[in-house]
Structure formats: C-alpha cells, structure tokens
Image: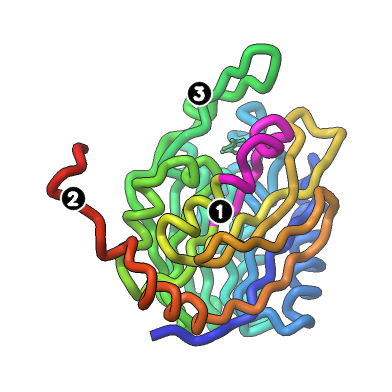
Amino acid sequence: MYKDFKLGLCQMLVTMSKEENLAKAIEIVGKAASSGCNIIVLPECFNSPYGTNYFAEYAEDISDSESPTLKTLKSLSIQYSIYLIGGSIPEKNENKIFNTSVIFNPNGEIIGIHRKVHLYDMDIPGGIRCFESDVISPGNQATIVNTEYCKIGIGICYDINFPEYSWTLSKDDTVGILIFPGCFNIDSGSKYWELLMKVRAFDNSIFVAGCSQARNNDASYVSWGHSIVVDPLGQHENIDEKEGILIKDIRFDELVRWRNNILFRKHKRFDVYRQ
Ligand SMILES: NC(=O)CC(=O)C(=O)O
C-alpha cells in the first residue's frame, strides 16, 4: 500500500520578478532532484509575491499551453522524473482568481489541481491584515493525488487550520502524507505553524509536510519559513527561515506500526460528534 520515498521541500526566496522566481524554482528543484528526492514541493505563491495586491497581475490560466509557470513545472517533472507539487500560483479562470496548486507526475502529466479551500482573511490588531477573499475565490474540493508511493492529501497554507479538512484527506487509509505548500507570516508562523503541523500529524496518524517560502524581509508580507516534516507520532524536522531544502526519507513502517497499535483512527465516534 505504501512505498518509502525521499521528500524534498524547496523553501525558495520569492521576489517581485516572476522571471527570477521561475529561474529560482528551476535551480532549487534541480538541486533537490540531484539529492535523490522522488517527490518535490514548492511553496505557496512561488511565482508571485504573496499578497492581494499581486495576485491579479501574476495570475496565469493553467489551461493555456503557453503558461510560463505550467511549462516550467511540466518540464522539470519530466527532466528529473519526479512528482512535483507545484506549490501554488494565482490562477486566472474566466473572471475569477484562485490560489491553486498543480501537481505533476514524472511523465509531466497533471495528476491533481487543488484550489485553496479556506481563504486567509485575517485582521490581527497591531499585526497582519490580509483578506484573500477580496481577490481570490475559494476552491470547493479536498484534493488527493495518486502516486506510486502512496496517496497524498493536498492543502494550501490556511487549509491546515481546519482539522476537518485534514481528516477528510486522511480517512482514506491509503493516504500516507498530507502536504501543505504554505506562506505563514512571521506573526502566525511564530505562534502556531509548527503546532498545527504536529497536531494534524498526531491526530490523523499520518505524515504532514509544510513547505514555506523563505523569509524575504523586503516583502510586504514576510514569510515565516521553517519548512517542516512531522511523523505520525508528532516528531518533527525543520529548517530555519533562510532559503534551503528540507530533505526527508519518508519511511512507512513507523506509520503502519503506529496505526496498528494506537487506534485513534478507529475509535472515532461520529455518532456522538456534531457537525
Ligand atoms: N497564506 C496563508 O494562508 C497564511 C496563513 O494561513 C497564516 O496563518 O499566516
């Protein structure tokens, strides 16, 4: 049901230049692939600065065969024969914009499209103010993709805040890992990025990975960084805020042992819980 693999989380620095961002993605994915990673992940908004002022300008139509970002992702997945979770990009679709992750298999075929379901609308007194819903439309589906290693549940950033979303992905026993391209800010990130990743992993007895943008202190929205992988017991590895790659061998024997002995997943009482 599961096959071990090497995961690479590419915590790249995102700038105002889409051209530079795509060149950076090519460089960092190449490095992760050279280190033997089978599944490689980019962060939320890897081709665009994160922010409601930018989404429309940087958005691309993912059905357009000339989309520069999609062409880049496709050719990287083929060149390195990898599964590539293309972080997210602002997606233009008719008159709407979505925050969208496109996932490729090693043949360069799209195996999943996830549109961020929970929009980040936040006004912290004295802190960050961001209303994604001013510009972005929400997706309406939980996304699971099939790979030769396991099924993967996909969410984007703020999607991790909702336990029901992670459970919806995790309840299929063949899903071995949840992957969240992200861009928490330094306020939310310092408070609960690690906590959320750990609790979702522990609650669902599953691996969880969060791949962040690197911190860019020149950006209007400063990313927390600290890309992270958590195992089903809640043990984690992460990197700091700078550009870098977190490489982690995902070994499923531990997940299987844990699920066989600790039966949270089977003890749920949906007959008691309220919607
Ligand atoms: N990009 C986001 O969705 C930001 C977020 O979730 C946060 O807490 O910060």
How many numbered callouts?
A: 3
Residue 185 forms part of the magenta stretch: yes
Point out the image quarter for the N terminus. Answer: bottom left
Q: Residue at x 81, y 68 (%)?
A: 27
- Against 186, residue 264 (above or below) is below
Residue stretch rendered in magenta on the structure: 180-195
Quadrant of the rendered structure where residue 76 is?
bottom right
Query: What residue type is disc 2 on?
Result: Phe
Q: Residue 134, labelled with which disc?
A: 3
* Residue denoted by label 1: 198
* Residue denoted by label 2: 270
* Sequence-earlier tag: 3 or 1: 3
CA distance for labels 2 and 3? 35 Å
* Sequence-earlier tag: 1 or 2: 1
Q: Residue 107: where, in percent of width, then height?
A: 54, 83
Local crowd at mark 1 within 10 Å, few (<14), some, or many (≥20)? many
